[in-house]
Image (spheres, rainbow, N blue to C red):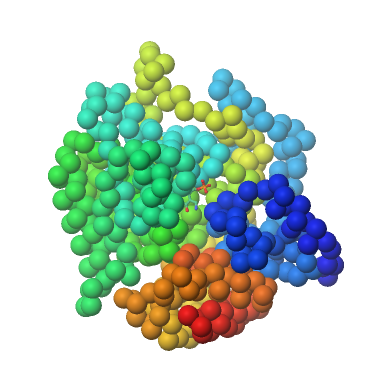
């Protein structure tokens, strides 16, 4: 039972002092609702307006096991009574060590390749990406390969908003205005299966994109230090999905061209795609990147933390008498003990609750509930990878005819979802389900019913 409190008062106080992320503030609160939240409970957010909202986007893809999950909360509280923070240069603490041990033990592994062997912590996803990019660049410099200054990334990829991460991202809405400030990056075509020409399979898209990557690396032989991608799903780019074959082909191409492979599993890691890590789904036993970026679900969605996992060979490339050849990158809160304790608690839930098996069952249920929506006249594509389902809305249900951006179909859908107590925060005109893993059957049915209504309502007048 939630009691309506002073939502209006909190909204007014908020707008007096806060500048919100990813928001044109002018749209608040009339065009874009602002929902003061008092608490969370499982897959629900409890609004100060007395209503509850189903968090179908896992609070920006961070939450794994539900809000206020008691085991993670208890682990953070226990750690806070003992040690809340300590400088990680020159000092060490058990949660950081234990978490690194466990992450290395579960990280993707490929036969015949030396495993990921070292963990470098940062404190948010973008910072984790910066770490990986800087490591790749600096490693080659330490070897005297000074001409390897460029990164290769995928069209429509997203890796965060800081200037380094933004440089390797290709979502124009976030990138365009800052383009003059960004490091040089070459973009290879995305293997996105949505871009298939008639008669092409997702594998064909993967092969075609890999050929283009090969040509790009060939054309810039000796100039590229790393290739970065989001394995299986380009999330912020619209939940665009590709065939796992691409991971294998890209891994082989990185080896052939002597380029490091950075897998950004910040959004797709920790069971979201059906396996613990998306890289595991590549053919022939999965692939192992040279650098793996993790964040978001790492702490179960409780606290900001990121980790860049690196091979022993990368680590050894920085061992030297000179401090300049060391990797000096540092954040005050690197490896924060509270965040590491949260991450350890989250990992132990994977062990105790058979999370991956439950996710497979939930994903099958999501597929069954989403299927009828696939034939809606405004749904141009329905796609799914594990516990991510996306509905690409288009004017006449065909891929080539998106809605006029001015009609703000996605925003209409978002508002219609909130009216019905469901958070369906769109990416443009793409709606998606990416719920906490604890979502139950009744909640999934509500999600499906509301999604159908919302698509009808949002597209009716567009
Ligand atoms: N990489 C990917 C794949 C992401 O989805 C995100 C966040 N949406 C980031 C990096 C950046 O993470 P953060 O927002 O914590 O900086």
Tell me which corner region of the image, top left, top right, bottom left or bottom right, holds residue 58: bottom right
Q: Quadrant of the N terminus?
A: bottom right
Q: Is residue 173 above or below residue 402?
A: above
Residue 102 appears in view: no
- Counting from the top left corner in percent of width and height, residue 369 is at 53, 81
Residue 28 appears in view: yes
In the rendered picture of this protein, how many numbered marks are placed on residues?
0
- Give the residue drawn at x 53%, y 79%: 458
Tell me which corner region of the image, top left, top right, bottom left or bottom right, holds residue 149: top left
Judge from the rendering whether residue 44 lies leftward or rightward of residue 136; answer left or right.
right
- Counting from the top left corner in percent of width and height, residue 257 is at 19, 42
Judge from the rendering whether residue 428 lies leftward or rightward of residue 346; answer left or right.
left
- Counting from the top left corner in percent of width and height, residue 255 is at 23, 43
- Give the residue drawn at x 38%, y 14%: 322
* Of residues 21 and 15, the one drawn nearer to the viewer in this rendering: 15
- Give the residue drawn at x 63%, y 45%: 303
Tell me which corner region of the image, top left, top right, bottom left or bottom right, holds residue 457: bottom right
């Amino acid at each position: 039972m939630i009691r309506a409190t002073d939502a209006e008062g909190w909204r007014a106080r908020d707008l007096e002092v806060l500048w919100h992320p990813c928001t044109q503030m002018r749209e608040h609160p009339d065009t874009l609702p602002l929902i003061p939240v008092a608490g969370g409970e499982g897959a629900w957010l409890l609004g100060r307006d007395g209503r509850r909202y189903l968090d179908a986007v896992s609070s920006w893809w961070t939450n794994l096991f539900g809000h206020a999950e008691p085991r993670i909360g208890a682990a953070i509280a226990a750690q806070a009574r003992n040690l809340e923070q300590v400088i990680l240069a020159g000092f060490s603490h058990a949660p950081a060590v234990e978490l690194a041990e466990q992450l290395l033990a579960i990280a993707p592994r490929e036969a015949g390749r030396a495993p990921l062997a070292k963990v470098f912590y940062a404190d948010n996803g973008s910072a984790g990406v910066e770490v990986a990019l800087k490591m790749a660049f600096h490693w080659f410099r330490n070897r005297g390969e000074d001409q390897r200054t460029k990164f290769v990334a995928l069209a429509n990829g997203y890796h965060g908003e800081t200037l380094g991460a933004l440089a390797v991202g290709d979502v124009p809405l976030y990138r365009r205005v800052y383009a003059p400030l960004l490091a040089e990056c070459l973009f290879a075509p995305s293997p996105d299966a949505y871009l298939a020409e008639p008669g092409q399979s997702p594998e064909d898209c993967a092969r075609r994109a890999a050929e283009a990557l090969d040509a790009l690396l060939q054309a810039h032989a000796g100039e590229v230090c790393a290739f970065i991608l989001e394995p299986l799903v380009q999330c912020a780019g619209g939940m665009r999905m590709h065939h796992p074959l691409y991971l294998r082909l890209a891994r082989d191409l990185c080896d052939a061209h002597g380029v490091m492979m950075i897998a950004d599993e910040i959004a797709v890691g920790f069971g979201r795609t059906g396996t613990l890590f998306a890289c595991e789904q590549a053919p022939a036993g999965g692939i192992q990147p040279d650098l793996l970026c993790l964040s978001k679900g790492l702490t179960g969605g409780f606290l900001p933390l990121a980790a860049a996992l690196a091979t022993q060979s990368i680590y050894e490339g920085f061992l030297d008498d000179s401090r300049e050849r060391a990797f000096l990158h540092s954040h005050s809160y690197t490896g924060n003990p509270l965040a590491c304790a949260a991450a350890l608690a989250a990992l132990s839930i994977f062990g105790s609750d058979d999370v991956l098996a439950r996710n497979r069952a939930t994903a099958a249920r999501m597929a069954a509930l989403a299927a009828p929506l696939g034939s809606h006249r405004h749904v141009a594509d329905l796609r799914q990878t594990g516990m991510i389902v996306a509905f690409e809305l288009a004017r006449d249900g065909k891929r080539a005819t998106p809605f006029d951006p001015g009609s703000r179909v996605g925003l209409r859908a978002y508002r219609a979802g909130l009216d019905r107590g469901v958070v369906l925060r769109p990416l443009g005109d793409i709606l998606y389900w990416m719920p906490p893993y604890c979502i139950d059957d009744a909640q999934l049915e509500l999600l499906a019913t509301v999604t159908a209504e919302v698509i009808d309502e949002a597209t009716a007048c567009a």
